[in-house]
Image: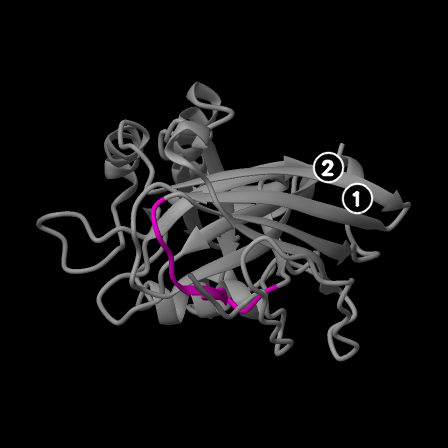
Amino acid sequence: MKLNALAVLGLIVFFSACTETPPSVDFSSPELFLIKEESSKLNESERPDPQFKNALLEDITGVRCTNCPDAAKKAKAIKDANPDRVVLVGVYTSLYTNLTQPHHDDLDLRTQVATDIHGVLYGSPPLPGGGVNRVKFDGQSGITLLKEQWATRVNDQLEEISEVNLDANLEWVNDTTVDINAVIHFNKDRDDQVYFSIMMLEDGLVTAQSDKPGLIEEYEHEHVLRKMYTPYNGTPLITEAEEGEQLTISWRVYLPDNVSFDKSSLVLFLNLNEDDTKEVLQCTELKLY
């Protein structure tokens, strides 16, 4: 195995199998740093069963988009049917200002990272847009799917065996700091670069929203992407891995003061970032409440 992200926003740490390093701090990135890293190779009898793949459903949306509330309803129904296996992310882009500019002096849900996901990863599709695990499915020219396709594609992904297991939990350090503890197990050999991504989501944000019947003055937005602790396309984790390789990693996360922790969660996922694939290999959502 060759590891190269356990680098967090420019911090690069190298380690060998079955070793652990002291906590490492990237002082240039005060919101996230690596505190633990271990690598090991499990015997065949010790290896866990491969997990089924979870689904990252990204709903690219805007507060002046009259078709977006219907897309949000479809996404919520998919999430509600698979609450522990579907991670739903509301991606509030700044592109197409006629569809995304806030009404009145409302809270602006748009972020640069959401705009990068929409513009760079998805290629700026019209709203509502989105995709499932950033997979380019057969017959598609890109990773963008119509909202009517989401349920079928999510179900397809949930039936697949994952090439990598991802288990994670949160541990509170203090009132504004948590540790993400993750175990990553590779179920097959890999010779490509794998990235990790960490998002923060928030529910229950109330702003005005355009809808087909008219303007809804107090519309409750759910699963809103509020920030990412990694770049929009992730941070490098490994360059190659053997079947049975296992990483045990902990990151310390400093939470922002502009979100309600009792309505928020952190999302951790592993993804590719090649010219021909941006696929999410596995994902999980960790609630802060």
Please name the amino acid that badge 2 sits on: Lys
Which quadrant of the figure has residue 165? top left
Please name the amino acid that badge 1 sits on: Ser
For this rendering, which residue is in front, 160 or 120?
Answer: 160
For this rendering, which residue is in front, 236 or 136?
Answer: 236
The kind of secondary structure element at disc 1 is loop
Is residue 65 visible in the rendered image? The answer is no
Please check the rendered image and state whether residue 107 is part of the magenta-colored stretch, yes or no: no
The kind of secondary structure element at disc 2 is helix
Left or right of residue 195, residue 183 in this image: right
Left or right of residue 284, residue 263 in this image: right
Mark number for residue 263? 2
Residue behind mark 1: 260
Q: Residue furthest right?
A: 174
Q: How many marks?
A: 2
Which residue is at a point 42% across and 19% down the rendered structure image? 81
Is residue 137 visible in the rendered image? The answer is yes
User: Magenta part of the protein: which range?
Assistant: 230-243
Which residue is at a point 45% across and 37% down the rendered structure image? 72
* Label pair 1/2, CB-CB below 8 angstroms: yes
C-alpha separation, residue under disc 1 versus residue under disc 2: 6 Å
